[in-house]
Amino acid sequence: QVQLVESGGGLVQAGGSLRLSCAASRRTFGSYGMGWFRQAPGKEREFVARIPWSSGSLYYAESAKGRFTISRDNAKNTVYLQMNGLKPEDTAVYYCNARERGYDYWGQGTQVTVSS
């Protein structure tokens, strides 16, 4: 089992910034690392960004490129999502994700609301 705890959501005006954090109870095995997804009202959950534990590769959705930055602190088993230039369409519940042996773990979600 892996527990994921997110924090850092909130209400921000368009153009503002937020930093989300996700602390894992332990590091997961395998190359997947951890990632962020989001789900807006009435929409399916969608991928935002992912960072492997040990490689330098970073993966972003097109909507996140140039505005969001994912990073990690391996010593703390923590992943961050720095979100700049937020837009109203970024409003969603953001979920932290980890994958191990084909099984997905999810955090409880943190609400991000961007006002216009």
Image (spheres, rainbow, N blue to C red):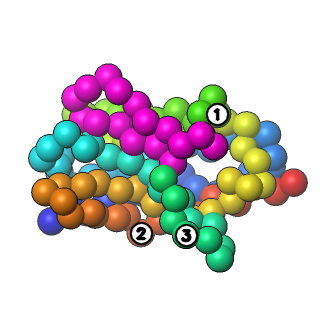
In-front residue for pair 80/105: 105
Q: Position of residue 20 (x, y in %)?
A: 51, 47
* Element type where label 2 sits in the image: loop
In whole angstroms, how far apart are the C-alphas of marks 3 and 2? Answer: 16 Å
What residue does disc 2 label?
A: 108
Residue furthest to the bottom in view is 42
In whole angstroms, how far apart are the C-alphas of marks 3 and 1? Answer: 21 Å
* Element type where label 3 sits in the image: loop
Say which label, 1 or 2, has the lower sequence index. 1
* Residues drawn in magenta: 48-64
The secondary structure that most of the magenta stretch takes on is loop
In-front residue for pair 114/90: 90
Asked whether residue 7 appears in the rendered view, the answer is: no
When the figure is inspected, residue 44 is found, relative to residue 96, above or below; the finding is below
What residue does disc 3 label?
A: 44
Residue 35 falls left or right of residue 28? right
Q: Position of residue 16 (x, y in %)?
A: 75, 41
Residue 50 magenta: yes
What residue does disc 1 label?
A: 67
Circle 3: residue type: Glu
In whole angstroms, how far apart are the C-alphas of marks 1 and 2? Answer: 24 Å
Residue shown at 32% from the left, 46% from the top: 34
